[in-house]
Image (cartoon, rainbow, N blue to C red):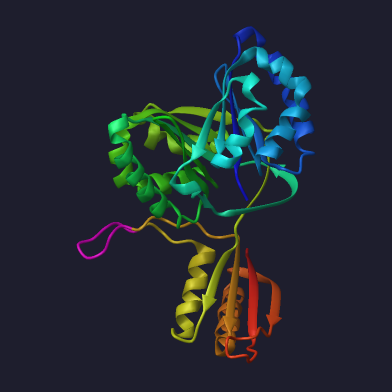
């Protein structure tokens, strides 16, 4: 599934802020009915406003623009700039129908590659995510080196448990990283994890914003104020259909049962950060997962059952689903398989 983001930036005179905020409820009510909406919510920094919104495709983004036409016509009086971010094919699809809005189009870099650690579905619920919003400007002669550094960012970030999405977009020699985290703590863990490539990219940084619930962005201030960061508080009406992806642990008979018992506990309790030593690199803290699926095939089904049972016995989680199958193997014979889902308590 593609992620197509609309970035509208507004600046509202102080005397008109209250009237501008009155439009939010109409925007929310209309947008919550859209099947293609991933998340939607207004943020502000003083009298500047930004709507944090993403959709499943260019078609869904266009449908949204049509759906909110009435409040958008009023809000447009305060629109300072408009950006679209997403796969190049979607940007191409948006170009003609939105040219009257004079947007800039930002296409995904790295061949359209991005980190996506979530699923979407169900009714919209309260949004509590936190975004880092960095913009970079890179001299033409240094773009190739910057792109190599982007790959380092991606490789480090893809395994962060608290990262929901992460990917670079580009418009000419300007770059942006679309990145979303579950909490302020996850933002701090990410910044610690990407310290090396960030030190290289820092000289190109033009602006940096952090957006999310006030309590979460407050957690990030001590570590980010020196970067000239501005902080954008998320409106209480913001909604999302994002559900963090379920963690999965596939067990085998190659390692002892106790190894998987400890691994399941680490998933459900989280892991503390570890400082670097002479022999080992530093390791970032990993938050606990909300759900863990433990699966095993053949002789490993017993290992999966033992690991899941130990987690429940130790009070770390509750088994909420058990599934069994008998899939065919390459040799033509069937093999028992079990999958056990545990919800953290």
**Does 224 appear in magenta?**
no
Q: Is residue 46 left or right of residue 28?
A: left
Q: Quick check: 146 above or below 111? A: above
**Does 281 appear in magenta?**
yes
Q: Is residue 243 left or right of residue 285?
A: right
Q: Find residue 218 and report its horizontal and vertical position in percent.
A: 49, 34
Q: Is residue 334 left or right of residue 139?
A: right
Counting every numbered tag in the picture gives 0
Q: Quick check: 277 above or below 103? A: below
Q: Find residue 14 and report its horizontal and vertical position in percent.
A: 60, 9
Kindly indicate the quadrant of the structure image that contains residue 17: top right
Report whether residue 272 is seen: yes
Q: Tell me where the magenta segment starts and ends, as one range.
A: 274-282
Q: What main secondary structure does the magenta stretch of the protein show? A: loop
Q: Residue at x 45, y 55 (%)?
A: 158
Q: Residue at x 58, y 35 (%)?
A: 91
Kindly indicate the quadrant of the structure image that contains residue 341: bottom right
Q: Find residue 56 and report its horizontal and vertical position in percent.
A: 66, 44
Kindly indicate the quadrant of the structure image that contains residue 173: top left
Q: Find residue 345 and report its horizontal and vertical position in percent.
A: 63, 63
Q: Residue at x 64, y 76 (%)?
A: 339
Nearest to the observer: residue 5 or residue 225: 5
Report whether residue 185 is seen: no
């Amino acid at each position: 599934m593609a992620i197509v983001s609309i970035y509208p930036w507004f600046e509202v005179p102080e005397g008109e802020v209250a009237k501008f905020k009155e439009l939010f409820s109409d925007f929310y009510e209309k947008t919550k009915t859209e099947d293609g909406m991933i998340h939607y919510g207004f943020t502000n920094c003083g009298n500047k406003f930004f709507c944090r919104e993403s959709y499943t495709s260019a078609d869904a983004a266009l449908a949204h623009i049509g759906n909110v036409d009435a409040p958008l016509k009023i809000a447009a009086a305060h629109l300072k700039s408009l950006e679209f971010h997403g796969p190049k094919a979607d940007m191409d699809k948006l170009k003609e129908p939105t040219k009257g809005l004079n947007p800039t189009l930002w296409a995904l870099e790295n061949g359209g590659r991005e980190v996506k650690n979530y699923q979407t579905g169900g009714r919209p619920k309260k949004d509590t995510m936190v975004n880092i919003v960095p913009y970079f400007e890179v001299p033409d002669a240094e773009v190739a080196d910057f792109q190599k550094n982007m790959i380092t960012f991606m490789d480090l970030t893809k395994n962060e448990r608290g990262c929901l999405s992460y990917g670079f977009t580009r418009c000419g020699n300007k770059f942006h990283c679309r990145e979303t985290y579950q909490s302020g703590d996850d933002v701090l863990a990410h910044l610690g994890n990407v310290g090396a490539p960030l030190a290289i990219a820092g000289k190109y940084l033009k602006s940096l914003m952090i957006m999310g619930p006030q309590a979460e962005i407050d957690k990030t201030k001590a570590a980010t104020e020196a970067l000239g960061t501005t902080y954008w508080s998320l409106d209480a009406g913001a909604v999302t259909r994002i559900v963090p992806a379920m963690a999965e642990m596939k067990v085998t008979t190659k390692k002892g049962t106790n190894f998987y018992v400890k691994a399941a506990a680490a998933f459900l309790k989280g892991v503390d950060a570890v400082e670097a030593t002479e022999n080992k690199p530093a390791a970032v803290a990993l938050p606990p997962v909300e759900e863990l699926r433990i699966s095993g095939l053949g002789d490993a089904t017993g290992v999966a059952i033992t690991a899941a049972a130990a987690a429940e016995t130790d009070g770390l989680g509750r088994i909420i689903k058990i599934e069994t199958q008998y899939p065919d193997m390459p040799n033509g014979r069937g093999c028992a398989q079990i999958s056990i889902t545990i919800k953290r308590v």
